[in-house]
Amino acid sequence: MRSTTQPHRIGLIVPSSNTTLESEIPELLRRQQASGGYRFTCHSSRLRLQQVTPEALQRMNESAEKAVDELCDARVDALIYACLVALMLKGRDGIQSTQARLARPCMSTPSGGKAPAVVTSAGALVNALRALNASRVSMITPYHKQLTERVAATLGEYGITVVHSRSLEVVDNVEVGRLDPDKLLALASQMDFSGSDALVLSACVQMPSLPVIEEAEQRFGLPVISAATASAYELLQRLDIEPDIVDAGSLLRPRVEMLKVPA
């Protein structure tokens, strides 16, 4: 394992209109650094996306290899492909094939270095729910209802049932980033969590939720995650670092505390 004095370089592949993940992931890693001594730097590459439609998402996916090449030039230790719905639209096979496709350019590293780990926010959400033993979930998305249904169908392929969902019907991705987390918490308060093992408060890396995740857990009495916290969890797992992040939900607490959610 590398020295805690040498920073881990983290690559972020984000839609061009994304303004949220590049603040939430560095903030989560800052909190990890404060508790565990590891250091991180974040480096971004952008893919063109303005409207969250199936056609635009497909075009963005097709251009992803260039962003991977750019981040591999920086010799990052890991990279996150940060658009959940873009891969959820393609189903389980699409998530797996895209992850394999994005990992391929990283295999040839200069000077025989180690290839970076490739994390997708879509795959990370699945793995986070599995870590929480959550097979029945509630979910809030900014998408049109049809896209939310596609996300739910893909989770169903992994044996995870979406029992309740709320779609905010926002297509402009910049406007998604301007949504108020406090209003998100108010929306969640109107939902019925009976039969849910966890709440996905933001099934989108662009919809801000980090400021209210801990409060949501306290209020609703079940694990609360987002696409961003799931991505951070998967990233730390791939770097072999024990999560120890405050005020971001039970998922990112040390393992002995992870499932201790107030009743």
Image (spheres, rainbow, N blue to C red):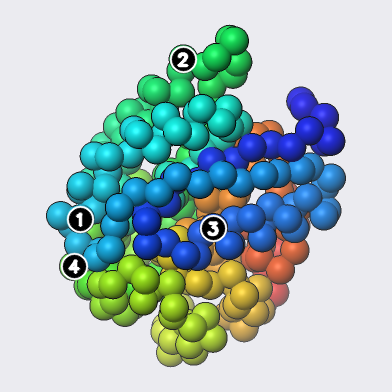
Query: Which residue position holds label 1?
Result: 56
Query: Which residue position holds label 2?
Result: 108
Mark 4 or 3: in front is: 3
Which comes sooner in the sequence, label 3 or label 1?
3
Q: In which quarter of the image is residue 193?
A: bottom left
**Given the image, on which type of amino acid does mark 3 rest?**
Glu
Query: Which residue position holds label 4?
Result: 146
**Given the image, on which type of amino acid does mark 1 rest?**
Ala
Disc 3/disc 2 C-alpha distance (Å): 27 Å
Residue 180 point in image, percent of width and height: 49, 83
Query: Which residue position holds label 3?
Result: 22
Check disc 2 and report its element: helix, strand or loop. Answer: loop
**Given the image, on which type of amino acid does mark 2 rest?**
Ser
Q: Do the residues labelled 3 and 1 touch (CB within 8 Å)?
A: no
Within 10 Å of the Cα at label 4, are there few (<14), some (14-19), or many (20+) other Cα atoms?
few
Q: In which quarter of the image is residue 115?
A: top right
Query: Does 147 appear above or below 42?
Result: below
Disc 3/disc 1 C-alpha distance (Å): 21 Å
